Amino acid sequence: MLIELKDVNKTYFGAQPLHVLKGINLEIERGEFVSIMGASGSGKSTLLNILGILDNYDSGEYRINGKLIWDLTEAKAAEYRNKMIGFIFQSYNLIGFKTAVENVELPLFYQGVSRHKRHDMAMEYIERLGLKDWSGHYPNEMSGGQKQRVAIARALVTKPDIILADEPTGALDSKTSVEIMELLKELNERDKLTIIVVTHESGVANYTNRIIHIKDGIIGEIEENQAHNSVRFGSDGTLK
Amino acid sequence: MKFDIDRYKEIIDTLSRNRSRTLLTGFGIFWGIFMLLLMLGGGDGLKKILNQNFEGFTSNAVIVGAAPTSKPYGGFKRDRTWYLDTKDIEAIKTLVPETDIVTMMDADWGGTMTYKDNSYNGIVKGLTYEYAGVESPQLLYGRWINEVDCSQERKVCVIGKQVWSNLFPDGEDPTGEYINVKGSYFQVIGVDNRNGGININGQPDQSVVIPYPLMDKMNNRGGRFDIICMTLKEGADSDVSQYKVRGLLSRRHSIAPDDKPAIMMLDTQKIFKIVDNLFKGVNILVILVGLGTLLAGAIGVSNIMMVTVKERTTEIGIRRAIGATPKMILSQIITESIGLTILAGMFGILFAVFILWGAGNIVSSLPDINNPVSFQIGFWTGIAVLMLLVVLGVLAGLAPALRAMNIKPVDAMRDE
């Protein structure tokens, strides 16, 4: 089992304590393509942060590959993120003053990979995502779809166990959204990558093989979606 | 922590791709260093210019002058005029062993000198060959008066720069020519190139120096004169020597032992010390003001870095999300700060050196300046300033770096 969550709780202590995750139990196997779907305020972002070791949880257990993720130092958390998780964000989160290939190189830089090897590896992924001619361009010279491809290349370059995509199509038009989702689907099918997509769009969720519904901090229905017909939307390839 | 070239390339990239930010941040340091070095170099140059006034003057000379008495003593009334004489010189030489050179000076203010149709009204000084040990001449042509000139009472003279340019307006070598000094002809044997500056009994550039015995005869003073110049031996205590000389002269001339105004004494060592202390004070002031400016610059850097760290929250968050540890972020910001301060500081040093070089050239070309003056800062000052820059860089980067270190990847995501 790649990912195991047992009774994970998380409360934000503000002026008004907010119990966001109320005992999450979830198992995801290696090679799965799943989506976590919920409305805003459902706790899906918090869950994503915990899955991505970006945030701590208050109680319960979270294991990746059997390794308990609990009480990590910042340095250890950074190392785990770097080695085990690749992030894809809604707003791409590329560094503006670095070219496409330099952005892809960055996680390898933090791994201490030598410059030439880093560059070669980054170029390999850039090429694989069809951006060979754009490797030397800065993010603001690229379209949204291209930027997201760079971000995907950056997520893939460290060969992580899990790809976490947070609303990967949130800032894209419908045509590009389809392209990106097809790409993720292909990566899952061909390279057997474990991909978790967090979204509130049912069309996006419909691309995945399993849809985990989260509502008010509790896992609701878990839909098997091998046929990709859970919603009328998206069944014909239309997302928005 | 790894120390590979990549880390520095990363810093250079960050700095060079955010030019306006880098420029803005670096300016404070640039200005601070520039001002500090400019003032240090300027102060040093001023000191050198002032020191040119003391050029050739021995730092351990004592000048003794005869002035009217201020007290009645030994049957004499007060306000008696007295003179020094050649026997005093002998007495000082034998009875005050601390003295090295003891020689007389007699001067005539307002002596007319002529050569062909040119005339000049200057100072005539009667000196001995030994006087060169008190105030060494800077000979442009010829030689200084020697022992034989004095003993054989040769009618020779050394003329000052201004006398030369007035009597020989074409600027030719005047040695061998005869000039008329107060009615008698003297052969010019040398030209003293010194400017004014501190002097005894008149500026050297406006003076004509003739052997003392001739001066004595010309003025008919019978071996009497007003000033004795002497130098002290290495290590001699100037206060003790002065005390002995004063005692000796007051006995020889029946002056009250406590009549200070009657025997004027001037210790050049004290003057040199005053000037030295003055410049020490100037230096301390310069360093204080300069360091203050620099510190203000560093605080400016820190301030702007603080703002940019806030502005870069997302970038730092991304870096953290994809695997940078807090330590890596800390060292990145501090290295950026050091890089920035050194870069800006280097420009400051370069600019200051350039300006000082120009100032040195301009000042050296002024007519009043005899020798070229360098305003330049020393090599080790430069190295010390560089060290200071590194320290300032670390200090300036510390607070922003700590803040950057505390940025959580989640904060960055929320910052959108």
Image (cartoon, coloured by chain):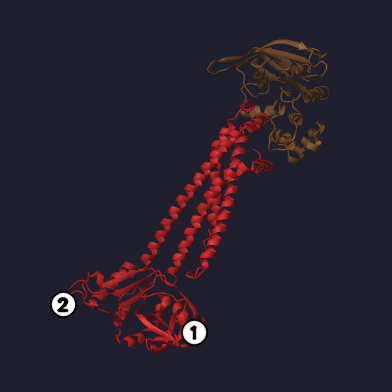
Residue that numbered label 1 is attached to: B174
**Residue at left 29%, top 73%?**
B245
Which quadrant, please, contains the C terminus of chain A? top right
Residue A110, position as x, y percentages in the image: 69, 34
- Does dot 2 land on a helix, a strand or a loop? loop
Residue B137, position as x, y percentages in the image: 45, 76
Crowd around label 2: few <14 · some 14–19 · many ≥20 (10 Å): few
Q: Which chain is red?
A: B
Chain A rendered in what hue?
Answer: brown
B106 left or right of B340? left
**Residue at left 54%, top 47%?**
B29
Q: Which chain hosts label 1? A: B
**Distance CA(mark 1)–CA(mark 2):** 53 Å
**Displayed quadrant of residue B207:** bottom left
The three-letter code of the residue at mark 1 reads Pro
**Residue at left 78%, top 16%?**
A206
Q: Which mark is residue B75?
A: 2
- Does dot 1 land on a helix, a strand or a loop? loop
Residue B121, position as x, y percentages in the image: 39, 81
Q: Closer to the N terminus: mark 1 or mark 2?
A: 2
Task: Choose between A125 and B163: the one closer to the eye.
Answer: B163
B306 left or right of A136? left
